[in-house]
Image (cartoon, rainbow, N blue to C red):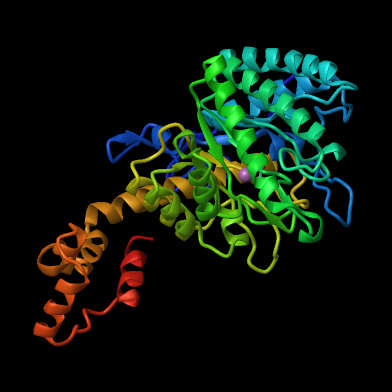
């Protein structure tokens, strides 16, 4: 096969002073930060859907992307050829992982049986390419939202046959993930929500979603798949309201239906924005519940109210993200998955390199800055000090359950007043962060 990116050689780390746009300035895979290499910390993944299937179309215009290796057909041969190009790209970029939806990698056939056969034929090539390059599958997932059969949702559809069809798809995609040694499997509820409550039995739909996930957990055990299950929160788009609306809603849902031990969260930046939260808020919510699994790294545009999935280049964003990731012990099964697409105007193949190099460098900087802030210790010390009243005296008695309202009343009657504690020092702390950026 003729290389698709013949003019591009392996992307190398050249250091901060390099002016080469096709080199890393900060991502040095072997550099050790807090006892692990950058490669081990960040576990970068390239998404198949945006990077190899994105056309650049939007509601106002057709696709713009120039992808000379793709003949535009829905043939298995084209899908296999595209897979080989994908691995050439990921290898030259030096990302250790990739992620797919079933329908990104292989076309749909006329029947479920034919669809599965086409999928098998492409999975064979993916496996061979993984073995050839050493690139691994971070997670697989199912596209149960694009086909018209999913118009009312998949597991939350009003039509039980659609639930059954989605189950077949997840079953097959889990088998493929296992076959490819995938380290996880993600559930993003593409249309698991509603457009209007006038036609929706919300309780029943949520019970069906829980039933579906329990069936997936059962099947995971049945086939011996040891990877991590993730739920990816998103509040809206395509539906008006999605049941997995944010990290807190997902955690509540998982707890209510006894699913929490089986799932962690895959937090996406642009989804946090759509939910009216910061990425840091979502990461802290997941982390505090022991459910921070992986991240979909991208960013939105605050002036555009939709899921623009841009590549992350903001150092504050990557610093705050990595501060939370390091705080909760780093990625175990997850990683930094670029669920991001080049702009419609960035239509040349080389733009795929610029986009990923920029995102990887932004995360490498975020990692180094976060590690430096942690080493400095002033931020952590400030937070610790702020809660010092809980480390002894009445605070410690409350935390350990030694006092009730009666004892607290006696304490306060004697003390007389709760004096305001020290300043929150937001500006001082923001300045402190800027010392490191
Ligand atoms: C959609 C989205 C998905 C999931 C996987 O907004 O983020 O691509 O990451 O289904
Ligand atoms: Co995503």
> Which residue is pictured at 67% across the width and 69% down the height?
303
Q: Is residue 21 above or below residue 299?
A: above
Indicate the position of residue 166 as horizontal and vertical percent values: 74, 31
Indicate the position of residue 154 as horizontal and vertical percent values: 75, 39
Q: Is residue 58 above or below residue 386?
A: above
Indicate the position of residue 427 as horizontal and vertical percent values: 34, 77
Of the 4 image quadrants, the one containing the C terminus is bottom left
> Which residue is pictured at 79% across the width and 22% down the height?
79
The answer to which quarter of the image holds residue 305 is bottom right
- Residue 100 left/right relative to 267: right
**Where ligand 2 lies, by quadrant?**
top right
- Residue 378 left/right relative to 300: left
> Which residue is pictured at 50% across the width and 33% down the height?
12
Q: Is residue 354 visible?
A: no
> In this view of the protein, which residue sits in the foreground, 232 or 38?
232
Q: Is residue 417 visible?
A: yes
């Amino acid at each position: 096969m003729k290389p698709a990116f013949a003019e591009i050689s392996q992307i190398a780390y050249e250091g901060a002073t390099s002016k080469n746009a096709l080199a890393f300035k900060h991502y040095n895979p072997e550099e050790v930060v807090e006892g692990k290499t950058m490669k081990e910390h960040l576990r970068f993944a390239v998404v198949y859907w945006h990077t190899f299937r994105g056309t650049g179309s939007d509601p106002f215009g057709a696709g713009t992307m120039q992808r000379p290796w793709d003949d535009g057909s829905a043939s298995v041969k084209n899908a296999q050829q595209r897979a080989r190009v994908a691995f050439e790209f990921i290898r030259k970029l030096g990302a250790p992982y990739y992620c797919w939806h079933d329908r990104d990698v292989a076309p749909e056939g006329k029947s479920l049986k034919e669809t599965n056969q086409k999928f098998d034929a492409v999975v064979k090539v993916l496996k061979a390419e993984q073995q050839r390059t050493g690139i691994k599958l971070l997670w697989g997932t199912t596209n149960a939202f694009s086909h018209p059969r999913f118009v009312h949702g998949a597991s939350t559809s009003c039509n039980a046959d659609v639930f059954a069809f989605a189950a077949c798809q997840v079953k097959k995609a889990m088998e493929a993930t296992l076959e490819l040694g995938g380290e996880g499997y993600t559930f993003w509820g593409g249309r698991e929500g509603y457009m209007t409550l006038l036609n929706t039995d919300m309780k029943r739909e949520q019970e069906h979603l829980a039933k579906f996930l329990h069936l997936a957990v059962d099947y995971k055990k049945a086939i011996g798949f040891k990877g991590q299950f993730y739920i990816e929160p998103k509040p809206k788009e395509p539906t008006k309201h999605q049941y997995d609306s944010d990290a807190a809603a997902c955690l509540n849902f998982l707890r209510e239906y006894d699913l929490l031990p089986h799932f962690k969260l895959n937090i996406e930046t642009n989804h946090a924005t759509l939910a009216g939260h910061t990425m840091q808020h979502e990461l802290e919510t997941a982390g505090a519940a022991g459910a921070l699994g992986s991240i979909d790294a991208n960013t939105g545009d605050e002036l555009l109210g939709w899921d623009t999935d841009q590549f992350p280049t903001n150092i504050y964003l990557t610093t705050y993200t990595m501060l939370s990731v390091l705080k909760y012990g780093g990625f175990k099964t997850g990683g930094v998955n670029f669920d991001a697409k080049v702009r419609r105007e960035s239509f040349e193949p080389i733009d795929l390199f610029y986009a990923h190099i920029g995102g990887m460098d932004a995360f490498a900087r975020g990692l180094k800055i976060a590690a430096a802030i942690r080493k400095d210790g002033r931020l952590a010390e400030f937070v610790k000090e702020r809660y010092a009243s809980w480390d002894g005296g009445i605070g410690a008695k409350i935390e350990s359950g030694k006092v009730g309202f009666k004892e607290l009343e006696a304490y306060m009657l004697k003390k007389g007043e709760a004096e305001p504690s020290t300043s929150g020092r937001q500006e001082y702390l923001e300045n402190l962060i800027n010392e490191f950026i």
